Image: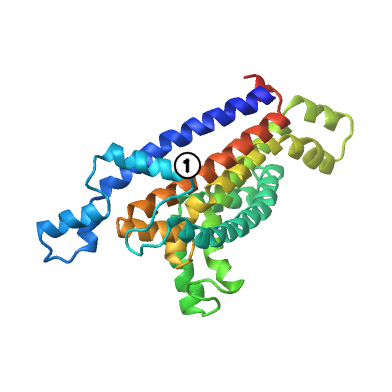
Amino acid sequence: MHRFIIRRIFQALIALFLLSIAIFFTSRLTGSPCDVMLPPEAREADFLLCEQNLKLDSPVWVQYLAWISGVLQGDFGRAFVTGQPVMGLIAERLPNSAMLGLVSVIFTTLVMIPVGILGAVMKDTKFDVVLRVITAIGQALPTFWLGILLMWFFAVQLRWLPVAGMGSWEHFILPVGAMAWSTIASQSRMLRSSMLEVMDSEFVKLARVKGASESSVVFKHSFRNALIPVTTMIGMHFGNIITGAMIAEVVFAWPGLGRLLYEGISTRDFPLIQACVLVVSVITITFNLLVDILYAYIDPRIRYD
């Protein structure tokens, strides 16, 4: 088990190193930040001075080495537009994203599990057909479109909920609904398939023959054995919440990391873009690593593959 964990940590570090290179170079594909920062009447000399002040006049690989050495010391640099330390901005916004993501994961899990179990237990009934249609629609709806639709109906037309921002528990409802909808749809379908596979296995059939009650077959024998993919799904959802929250944060003006990244992209603020994406990558890889380790504990065959 220790060798498995060490191997996975080593693979995660390699992935982070490669990602840091990709993040740094792709952020520069958006163009020069001086094009955004300077007025239209700026001369060529102004652009040269701007790039010199932002330290963009040296070769790109030299800029990367300077950036990554700072990152390894905990210094992500200063934002081009505001001049504030990037780590301070991230520390200010990250808790807001984490709070929104945590509520989304809890809500998704509480809804996804009963929907998936009911779909498996009531297979091919009218209830199952309705559930499958709803989940198929849920997977097809883009988050930004659903977010705008929810905002228009519940906030603008009915005036039941706040349009945007953050402040009370009511501000969570619309962004969490927009974020969780497609995840509930996809994960409940996966849980249903996993439950059906387990319920059709020989040991479950043997339990029925021995006279086990239907509730025992569903919850004790089937659901427990379907926990491995469920654990993986929840863990992966935790890792992707901040990435997935970006659209919801932009639509609902939620002051989180996703909105900060959007602001960085809009102004071509390289230090801000690089730091936000790297932090999201670290969070995603860390959760995937924890899921892999948990997966290996649950199913020992994984660690020997």
Residue 59 horizontal/vertical position (percent): 24, 39
Residue ID at (49%, 76%): 155
Residue 176 horizontal/vertical position (percent): 56, 61
Q: Quadrant of residue 95?
A: bottom right
> From the viewer's perspective, is 254 left or right of 211?
left
6 and 52: which one is in front?
52
Q: Quadrant of residue 278?
A: top left
Spot the residue most to the right.
211
143 and 236: which one is in front?
236
**Judging from the image, what secondary structure is the residue with disc 1 in?**
helix
Q: Is residue 166 placed above or below 7 in the rendered structure?
A: below
Q: What quarter of the picture does the N terminus occupy?
A: top right
249 and 44: which one is in front?
44
Residue 261 horizontal/vertical position (percent): 41, 56
Dot 1, crowdedness within 10 Å: few (<14), some or many (≥20)?
few
Residue ID at (48%, 66%): 254
Q: Quadrant of residue 170?
A: bottom right
**Callout count:** 1
Residue ID at (53%, 33%): 12
* Disc 1 residue type (three-letter): Leu
Residue 172 horizontal/vertical position (percent): 57, 67
Q: What quarter of the picture does the C terminus occupy?
A: top right
> From the viewer's perspective, is 180 left or right of 191?
left
- Residue 80 visible from this viewpoint: yes
- The residue where tag 1 is placed is 72
- Residue 196 visible from this viewpoint: no
Q: Is residue 30 placed above or below 197 in the rendered structure?
A: below
Residue ID at (43%, 61%): 259
Spot the residue most to the top.
304
* Colouring of the image: rainbow
> From the viewer's perspective, is 296 left or right of 211?
left
